[in-house]
Image: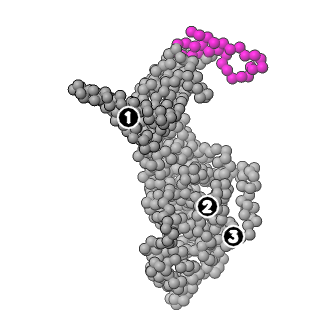
């Protein structure tokens, strides 16, 4: 036994260091702490992402240290070539002398050939990995029990853990946050195996499809409340990319939506957000996004615009049934504007009026005419008034407030500018309450035109914050449902966030939207809505109580039958961009907090578009 004592001078009395370290052949005693270290020398042949997570959920105190060192590609290729030569010569020698094939040698040879092919194609690199485990106990007898439990756990993971005999001090040093590895018992890992060893995953969630191209590109939502792991989830590796987020007011719903959007931008995901309360302006300004404030004078969205796409060769095109689809969309828009579904007679008259309106603008079913300037909603009202039919005049009179009256600002002109960019924020705060459902519908239609453009295929997210604004109208709910059904075909995920759970769960269309969301996030719920939540998501009594008492940012991430309780976390910089706490906003710089003054000195309404 070696006992090392360190006498500290009075000036260094506050320095963090143990008074004494007793070094034994297989363990250390540091004060009242008994420590034993192990080096992992044997690994399973095949692993899945997060396979080291059980080590982090070990019930005792266990330090897990990974020491990673990249290998020069030339050295790696040379060593791999020599290893293949040894394996292949052994196989041929056995075959030449009539011996039986060794299954382990055969498996090792196949793995070596596969690794060689991937390295030659540049699909990965080689690394030296040292995995060390250090267990702590308060007594010698407890240390023996902890060592026995740890070795049983490593054996269940098909790992061979060897004690650092006569190197117990060096084994303890490998677990300290100094980046030192005096043991140097390493194993060669390729990129795929090393990424699978990332330990901070949630054991409660199924691993993503390892064959997916988006496997290693998930988003960090927060940390697991039931284990030391992190909740890292990839929506684009699921059966569909949709997400639904339900939470009571003040539960951190918008905070989590903004956090996911910000971190998705790191992955080069294009995002469009419908912002009813102007909460995303600072975020858009910080990341160079496009801010589109509906309801401000001079900002228009023309519902009669045809979905014209610009192809890579510069030519413009549209779907073969673009005119018919636009007519159907106008049926939906007028139903939302009027707050009720159109009758059969009204639909027939509207069809005729829409066709006539486009003809007056020189647009027919001939696709060559579709690039001409589209008519306005006021033109449609004029045609309805001129038809002379009572039903047409009734529709025209109901359209009058939106074309010539108090609500004409949104429709009184051609679309201001086609919104483009990696982050689009459509603010609805300046719209009257009567126009917010229609504004939500128009922005969704605008986003859908970009999503369905075959010339710009890329991963996208469409966020509908406070979706209850649109779900109140049956026509709007049906449009949202159709979008949820079709978004996956266009590499797009729809995020539906709302605090009014009844508007979503109270209708068949709302339940259909939830069933078409592979990712479901439930934050704190009001007692009045918890019973509907429990029935819809088949929650246990413990999960029910958790949602009733969850703190801000706490919730359940559900993916089918798998659920995990999480706490959303953000860095200081992210928090400053996404917080909506009035007290915190008051302490931030006026450049980011006073959103009204930020746009007060703009001369032209077109300058309100904050592009890159």
- Give the position of the N terminus as an image quadrant: top right
Write down the residue under mark 2: 425
Residue at x 64%, y 48% (from the top left corner): 574
Check disc 3 and report the residue beneath it. Answer: 605
Name the image quarter holding residue 62. Answer: top right
Taking 21 as reference, is 488 above or below it? below
How far apart are the alpha carbons under marks 3 and 1? 63 Å
Which numbered dot is residue 112? 1
Q: Confirm whether residue 129 shows in the render.
A: yes
- Location of residue 23 with respect to 304 vertically, above or below: above
Secondary structure under badge 1? helix
In the rendering, at what x and y percent does residue 364 appear?
47, 82
Q: Are marks 2 and 1 in contact (CB under 8 Å)?
A: no
Q: Which marked residue is nearer to the observer: mark 2 or mark 1?
A: 1
Q: Is 412 covered by the magenta stretch?
A: no
Q: Closer to the camera, 5 or 207?
A: 5
Q: Are marks 3 and 2 in contact (CB under 8 Å)?
A: no
Distance from disc 3 to disc 2, alpha carbons, whole Å, reads 16 Å
- Name the colour scheme: one colour
- Residue at image x 43%, y 48%? 212
**Within the image, what quadrant is residue 516 found in?**
bottom left
Q: Name the one closer to the observer, 129 or 156.
A: 129
Residue sitting at x 50%, y 22% = 38
Which residue is more in the foreground, 5 or 139?
Answer: 5
Tell me if residue 9 is in the magenta stretch: yes
């Amino acid at each position: 036994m070696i006992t090392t004592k360190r006498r500290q001078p009075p000036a260094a009395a506050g320095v963090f260091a143990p008074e004494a370290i007793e070094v034994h052949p297989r363990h250390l005693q540091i004060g009242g702490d008994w420590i034993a270290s192990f080096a992992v020398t044997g690994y399973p042949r095949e692993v899945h992402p997060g396979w080291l997570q059980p080590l982090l959920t070990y019930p005792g105190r266990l330090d897990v240290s990974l020491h990673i060192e990249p290998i020069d590609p030339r050295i790696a290729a040379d060593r791999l070539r020599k290893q293949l030569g040894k394996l292949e010569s052994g196989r041929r020698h056995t075959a030449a002398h009539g011996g039986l094939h060794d299954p382990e040698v055969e498996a090792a040879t196949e793995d070596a050939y596969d690794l060689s092919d991937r390295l030659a194609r540049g699909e990965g690199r080689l690394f030296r990995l040292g995995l060390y485990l250090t267990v702590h106990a308060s007594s010698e007898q407890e240390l023996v029990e902890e060592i026995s439990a740890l070795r049983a756990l490593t054996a269940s993971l098909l790992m061979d853990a060897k004690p650092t005999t006569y190197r117990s001090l060096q084994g303890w040093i490998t677990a300290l946050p100094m980046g030192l590895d005096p043991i140097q018992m390493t194993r060669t890992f390729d990129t795929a195996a090393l990424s699978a060893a990332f330990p901070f995953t949630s054991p409660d969630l199924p691993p993503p499809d390892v064959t997916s191209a988006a496997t290693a590109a998930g988003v960090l939502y927060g940390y697991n409340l039931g284990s030391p792991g992190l909740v890292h989830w990839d929506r684009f590796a699921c059966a569909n990319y949709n997400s639904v987020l339900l939470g009571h007011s003040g539960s951190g719903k918008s905070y989590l939506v903004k956090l996911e959007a910000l971190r998705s931008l790191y992955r080069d995901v294009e995002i469009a957000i419908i912002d009813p309360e102007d909460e995303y302006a600072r975020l858009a300004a910080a990341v160079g996004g496009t801010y589109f404030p509906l309801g401000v004078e001079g900002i228009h969205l023309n519902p009669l615009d045809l979905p014209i796409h610009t192809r890579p060769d510069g030519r413009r095109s549209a779907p073969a049934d673009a005119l018919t689809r636009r007519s159907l969309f106008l049926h939906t828009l007028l139903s939302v504007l009027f707050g009720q579904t159109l009758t059969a007679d009204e639909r027939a008259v509207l069809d005729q009026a829409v066709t006539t309106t486009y003809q007056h603008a020189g647009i027919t079913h001939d696709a060559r005419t579709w690039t001409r300037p589209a008519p306005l909603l006021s033109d449609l009202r004029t045609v309805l008034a001129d038809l002379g039919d009572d039903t047409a005049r009734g529709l025209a009179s109901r359209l009058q407030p939106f074309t010539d009256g108090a609500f004409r600002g949104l429709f009184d002109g051609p679309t201001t500018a086609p919104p483009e960019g990696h982050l689009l924020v459509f603010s609805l705060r300046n719209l009257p309450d009567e126009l917010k459902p229609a504004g939500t519908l128009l922005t969704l239609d605008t986003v859908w035109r970009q999503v369905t453009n075959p010339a710009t295929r890329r991963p996208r997210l469409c966020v509908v914050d406070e979706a209850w604004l649109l779900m109140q109208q049956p026509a709007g709910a049906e449009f949202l449902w159709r979008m949820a059904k079709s978004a996956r075909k266009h590499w797009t995920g729809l995020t539906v966030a709302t605090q009014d759970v009844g508007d979503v769960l109270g209708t068949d269309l709302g339940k259909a939207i939830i069933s078409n969301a592979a990712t479901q996030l439930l934050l704190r719920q009001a007692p009045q809505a918890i019973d509907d939540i429990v029935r819809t998501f088949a929650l246990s009594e413990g999960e029910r109580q958790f949602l009733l008492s969850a703190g801000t940012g706490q919730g359940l991430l559900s993916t089918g039958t798998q659920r995990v309780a999480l706490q959303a976390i953000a860095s200081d910089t992210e928090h400053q961009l996404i917080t909506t706490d009035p007290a915190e906003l008051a302490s931030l710089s006026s450049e980011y907090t006073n959103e009204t003054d930020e746009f007060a000195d703009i001369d032209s309404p077109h300058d309100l578009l904050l592009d890159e």
